[in-house]
Amino acid sequence: MKNILTIMKKELTRVFKDRRLLITTIILPGLLIYLMYSLMGSGIAKLVSDSEPTKYYICTISGDKKFEEAVLAKEPNSLFLHLKENQVEEFKQKVSDGTYDILIDAPAYYYENFYKAMEDNQTVEKQDITIYFNSNSNASLSIYNIVASVYSDAQNDYVKKQNADVITLKNSDIAIIEKDSSFTQFAGMMMPLLLIIFLFSGAMSIAPESIAGEKERGTIATLLVTPVKRSEIALGKIISLSIIAICSALSSFLGVMLSLPKLLGGGDISMSNVYGFGDYVILLFIIVSTVMVIIGLLSVISCYAKNIKEASTFILPFFFLSMLLGISTMFIKSDNPLLYFIPIFNSVQAISSVFNMEANMINIIMTIVLNLCYTGLFVFLLTRMFNNERIMFNK
């Protein structure tokens, strides 16, 4: 174990102490993806907004004119429906099914009386205001932000005058996340492809340098003559390279997650509204096991190659193959356990099932276990190659 940790420390130090390698491998991918997707989303949103203005349907308890004027000043396309208090539950359902955009549960004429009391220098009674919105709807999310800002402005006005809080704004997302919703469908098709590309790209940037690079420089010979088992060298390299590749993939993954709302045009879609903590834990295990398979494969290819250039050439076809497997979710969806014996493909299907909210735990466990088995196989092959002088010293 000590020898494995030593090999890991050597590999991790090589990357994390090299500022240029650290920036290009881990920081830059996520940053570039975030900027690119955000700009794409802004462009799409502008095209949509220029084509046809969206009308926002707002349900309120009463016709509070001053409040409506404040909302209309920020969003002229707002339309108001005045309800009675006994209609709140009925119209919550209408917001949930998308008939209306938001429902504001506030006392009758509270906003109007709020400003009147301030003008008369009177104390205003503190009030809870609940806004019901639907996170599945871009229109609902957009008008929710506008209404919340109107109440926030009122609160700030009162704080400046009386130095006290009088409005407690409560948000209530009453969306029903369905398996066939556009968001989960988009995520289920695109995220497996993006994640596989990120994982492979991160691995491609470090694996050839780690083994083929050392062969090219001749430093691998020094490592092989040390009193360390070849299996420990192989395992140490695969684990350390997997850690670096995961860091690179997580950077890219965060870039996608942060830019996805803008790319989808909603601006305020929150992944936490759709997926729970358990989903992220499952994804983490799938990603970790997948990246170990990819690193194991690329390490074997890198070991076989004579130099970095040759290793990169050998790896390229596998990268394109992984992209093809990444888009397989667009035309193949199967719970057949036999298909989960195919490396990479099993991870793509498992990731897609999580994002589609159709996760089958048996298939996911199979995927993780099989990925670890494939990693063990690559460690075995790499050990045998380290023991083969013809391969290790062939230039």
Image: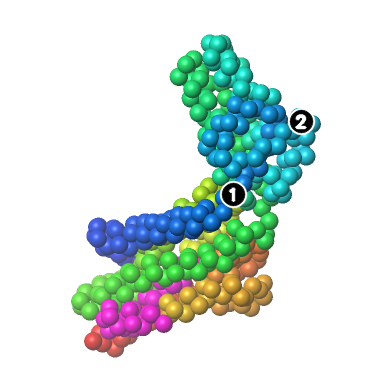
Q: Earlier in the sequence, mark 2 or mark 1?
A: 1
Residue 5 picture location, percent across and down: 34, 61
Mark 2–mark 1 CB contact (< 8 Å): no
Q: Quadrant of the N terminus?
A: bottom left
Magenta stretch, residue numbers: 289-317
Residue 21 picture location, percent across and down: 27, 62
- Structural crowding at the residue carrying mark 2, measured as other residues with C-alpha within 10 Å and reported as few (<14), some (14–19) or many (≥20): few
Q: Quadrant of the C terminus?
A: bottom left
Marks 2 and 1, how far apart in space?
A: 26 Å
The one nearer the camera, 32 or 388, is 32
Where disc 2 sits, the SS reads loop
Instruction: Give the answer, above or below, for where 5 lies relative to 71.
Output: below
Asked whether residue 313 is drawn in magenta, I would say yes
Say what amino acid the circle numbered 1 marks. Thr
Q: Which residue is mark 2?
A: 84
Say what amino acid the circle numbered 2 marks. Lys
Where disc 1 sits, the SS reads loop
